[in-house]
Amino acid sequence: MHCRRFPYASVVLLLTLGGLLAGCHKDDGPSPESQVQGLQMSTELERTKKKLAATEKDSAGKDDAVLLAKDDVEKAKKELAEKDKVIAGKDTRIHALEGEMAEMKKSDAFVFAEASKLHQQNLNTSSLDRYRQFVASFPASPLVVDANRAIAELSVTAPKDARARAVAIDPHAVEREALKKFVDGWATPEDLVPLLKRKSMADVVKLLGPPNATYREGTELGYVDKVVDATSGTRGTLVVGFEEDRVATLRLGYLGKPIRP
């Protein structure tokens, strides 16, 4: 509790003077001067009492305000601590969900669902590539059967759709897309037909790079594990055959069925 200072000395002095004056004139009765002085002292005494009461009231109010302020500060601290706790809990849950999502994206079901979604959106070329990637990445998945079924269907429709759209926009878009697929390792021999049609051996080496092997006395170039089977999605060797220094056949594997561009 704060130390309070009140005008007690003034009160005591007034009461003492009042007593002395009253004693001095007891026998003769109060003189006019003493009556005036007594009235003044009474007025001063009353004023002092009022000041004293007001001072006590003001002091009590300040003490109450200090206590209320302390309560408000404590309450604010508690609310802030609770908010920090809630935020920390949310951050923990977010990190956990992000981890679960990252793991989910690695699962066969998620990759298959992405490929299916592209198929539903009629993005057939992208969907076909995703299905092939799925088969190569998750060969033991029970969803491989469905993926292969989709690959067989899209292998017919996707190239036609892609060529039709590309030719309308850019006559050389099909060749560029085929080359990109080959570089990425997801091209089929069928994809490479428009790129390699009637090309010379020098042109093929310039486009695809040096071969890994040559066959039939150098009349065929082999690119090992650079193409995929359109039906199964498995990787194989692209064999490019030449007649009179022009591309004549494309095969998937040395014993594969020849495709004539």
Image (spheres, grey):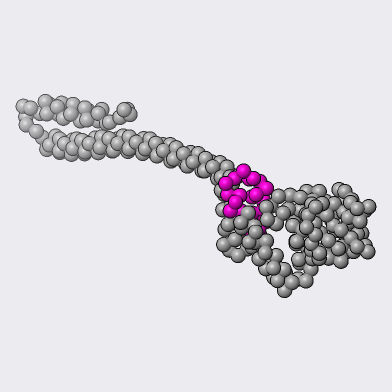
Name the residue at 79% across, 62% down.
Answer: 259
Q: Quadrant of residue 79?
A: top left
Name the residue at 87% across, 48% down.
Answer: 213
x and y, in percent, of residue 146 in the image: 58, 53
Residue 203 is at least partly visible in this image? no
Name the residue at 74% across, 49% down.
Answer: 235
Q: Nearer the viewer, residue 54 or 239?
A: 239
**With respect to residue 23, does 114 lie above or below?**
below
Q: Quadrant of residue 122?
A: bottom right
Q: Is residue 169 magenta?
A: no
In screen coordinates, is 100 left or right of 238? left
x and y, in percent, of residue 149 in the image: 61, 56
Image quadrant in which the C terminus is located: bottom right
Q: How many numbered discs, if any?
A: 0
In screen coordinates, is 143 left or right of 79? right
**With respect to residue 95, does 218 lie above or below?**
below
Q: Nearer the viewer, residue 77 or 191?
A: 191
Name the residue at 75% across, 61% down.
Answer: 190
x and y, in percent, of residue 257 in the image: 78, 58
Give the residues drawn in magenta, as a range. Answer: 125-147
In screen coordinates, is 257 left or right of 5? right
Residue 248 is at least partly visible in this image? yes
Q: Main secondary structure of the magenta part?
A: helix
Q: Is residue 126 magenta?
A: yes
x and y, in percent, of residue 120 in the image: 57, 62
